[in-house]
Image: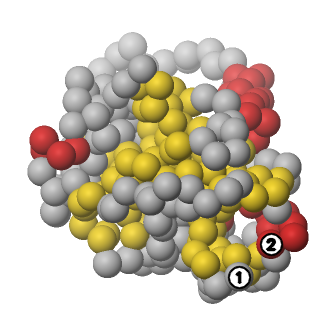
Amino acid sequence: MRRSILSLALGLLTMAPAMAEESALKSLQTANDSRGWDAVGRLNLGTKGFCTGALIGPKLVLTAAHCLFDKETGARIGIEDLEFLAGWRNGRAAAYRGVRRAVAHPDYVYSGAEKLARVAFDLALIELDQPIQLPSIQPFETDTLPGQGAEVGVVSYAQGRAEAPSLQQVCHVLGYQPDVLVLSCNVDFGSSGAPIFTIKDGVARVVSVVSAKAEIEGEPVALGTDLEGPLTTLRAELAAQDAAGTRGTPSVRVLSGNQSGGAKFIKPDAAATP
């Protein structure tokens, strides 16, 4: 993540009892280490840093909404500056993709001040310019919100570990309030947008994404966004844009071009921002 630590009052949250010791971070340095996790990637933000994202479809990356904004100016980062590096590890990625469009939750408002209420809408979908269709990179399914005390895990990039992802296989849901999870997971700056998983029957499913690094009474915690409502909204936003684009396409009658000397028309570039 790219922002300051958010301090929370304990009284704001329903907290679970102390959990068993969490697992340590494991750096996924080799192909064997990373097997099954290459759909997690580093989202480069031009010269503005990076976040973490995860494929939930061949062309769709789930991340945090604040990753789409310049932390200094508050302006949207142009899609031409966004790049998704699936399975980025030690200078190489399993797949490199640019971005066709990026949609932040419509109720998310970026500002300099840290506010707990923003976490509930800190979600974005990125549509890649080309699908990723490799046997080694399978998009993750999503699942419903885990309950208090549930065991979860996280795969993320962060400061000091930007060149390979790290897996924390076991951390816990410490507490919650509407649409926000408080987690014991070990995250740091750059982990924004990282997928939080539950594993059922050996299958990892995304249940949240990291929104912020926070602390409660001086103890570090991670804040995650509930996917259920916001993700449905984002999918609807993409569908509405697709429908509007279809309605807005004018019919074309070809007057020439069958002859070798016919006029050539150049397709205009896509807009620089979504």
Report if residue 53 is visible in the image: no
Q: Are marks 1 and 2 in contact (CB under 8 Å)?
A: yes
Residue 174 position within the rendered picture, expressed as x and y whole percent measured from the top left: 66, 56
Q: Residue at x 47, y 73 (%)?
A: 188
Residue 229 position within the rendered picture, expressed as x and y whole percent measured from the top left: 79, 36
For residue 2, what is the image quadrant?
Answer: bottom right
Residue 14 position within the rendered picture, expressed as x and y whole percent measured from the top left: 81, 57
Above or below for 237 versus 159: above
As measured in the structure, the alpha-carbon distance from the residue carrying label 1 to the one carrying label 2 is: 7 Å
For residue 42, what is the image quadrant?
Answer: bottom left
Q: Nearer the viewer, residue 84 or 265?
A: 84
Q: What residue is shown with label 2?
A: 10
Q: Residues within 10 Å of mark 1 (few under 14, many from 20)?
A: few
Q: Residue at x 31, y 69 (%)?
A: 162
Mark 1 and mark 2 lie on one chain; the one further toward the N terminus is 2
Q: Secondary structure at mark 2?
A: helix
Q: Which mark is residue 217?
A: 1
Q: What residue type is disc 2 on?
A: Leu
